[in-house]
Image: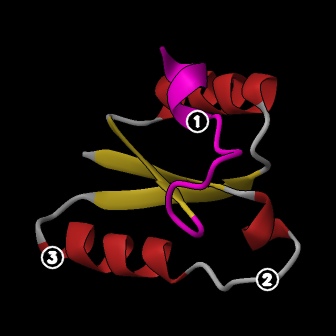
Amino acid sequence: MIAEIITIGDEILIGQIVDTNSAHIAQELNKIGISVHQITSIEDEHDHILTTLKQAYSRADVILITGGLGPTKDDITKKSLM
């Protein structure tokens, strides 16, 4: 099984925080036999979220989405996925 991890958040892209979520998730997936083929960090922007998700869907069996700082008042991920 192939997995892909998408991190969403401007704070990751500008270096405000380090993406430790993806490393932890990849380690745990590996333990149960799921191979992570790609980790992508993207901006918190509606069209970019949807495009990236569609691309991941064409490559992976499992897609995990995580953020940088957790929910913030300007977070649009949930709205974009509805």
How far apart, in angstroms, are the residues tagged by discs 3 and 1?
28 Å
Residue 64: x percent and y percent? 39, 48
Q: Residue 49 at x, y = what percent?
A: 68, 32
Q: Going from the N terminus, do you reach mark 2 or mark 3 first?
A: 2
Circle 2 is placed at which residue position?
A: 16
Q: Is residue 26 above or below residue 51?
A: below
Q: Earlier in the sequence, mark 2 or mark 1?
A: 2
Determine the secondary structure under disc 2.
Answer: loop
Q: Is residue 79 magenta?
A: yes
Q: Residue furthest top?
A: 82
> Which residue carries the number 3 mark?
31
Of badges 3 and 1, the one in the foreground is 1
Q: Residue at x 66, y 23 (%)?
A: 50
Provide residue 71's location: percent of width, then percent of height.
Answer: 51, 54
Percent position (x, y) of residue 28?
22, 75
Q: Which residues are magenta?
A: 68-82
Residue nearest the observer in this picture, 54 or 68 = 68
Secondary structure of residue under mark 1: helix
Residue beneath the point at 50% across and 31% down: 78
Residue flagged by tag 1: what amino acid is it?
Thr
Nearest to viewer (mark 2 / mark 3): 2
The residue sitting at 66% across, 85% down in the picture is: 18
Residue 48 lies, with reference to residue 18, above or below; the image says above
Looking at the rendered structure, which numbered label has been put on residue 77? Answer: 1
Residue type at the position of mark 2: Gln
Q: Does the stretch in magenta take in 7?
A: no
Q: For the residue carrying disc 1, how many other residues have a C-alpha within 10 Å: few (<14), some (14-19), or many (20+)?
A: some
